[in-house]
Amino acid sequence: MYRLASTSEEIGRAFSSHRFAEAYPHLAADLRWELIGGSPLKGRDAVIAACEESAAYLSTATTEFRKFKSVVGPDAVVIDSLAEYTGPDGEKSVVASCDIYDFMNGEVATITSYTVEVAEDRPTDVASVHDRMR
């Protein structure tokens, strides 16, 4: 059993922390999920199907959030996270994510997600990333 998310921040935090079902009632029918670097998902049903597929895999792994921050505006929520995933075989992956939730009439109208796998031996602070880009 899950607790239903109710505020825009709770909805964003639930979705970004893989507690997808808590957010389902707040997804607009014509929701668009922009997966930067990949193909967008169009419509609530397509988004829920992708979430259920992801949840099935995640049920076999453990997730530890090293960072999980939210910024809330009047019609948007941004979640910045860094998560370590450990698969059933013990293999680890660290992923940095930024999810932007745009709300319209109390529902999630669009989600824009940026994700990148981060190597364990590389720093993840902004200054280090900036230095690597020079």
Image (cartoon, helix red, strand yellow):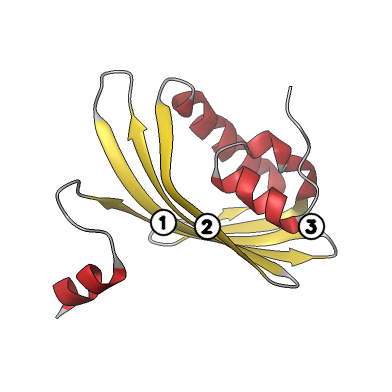
The tag earlier along the polypeptide, 1 or 3, is: 1
Is residue 43 depicted above or below 2 in this figure?
A: below
Name the front one of labels 3 and 2: 2
Q: Are marks 3 and 2 in contact (CB under 8 Å)?
A: no
The amino acid at mark 1 is Gly
For residue 35, say whether it is visible.
yes
Query: Residue at point 14% right, 81% down?
Result: 134
Amino acid at circle 3: Glu
Q: Residue at x 72, y 38 (%)?
A: 22
Task: Out of 71 and 103, give the one closest to the viewer.
Answer: 71
Residue beneath disc 2: 69
Left/right placement of residue 49 relative to residue 129 reads right
Q: Where in the figure is residue 53, as x and y percent of width and height? A: 52, 31
Label 1 belongs to which residue?
A: 38
Picture residue at 14% right of the left edge, 49% below the top: 121
Relative side of 61 to 74, left or right? left
Dot 2 and dot 1 residues touching (CB under 8 Å): no
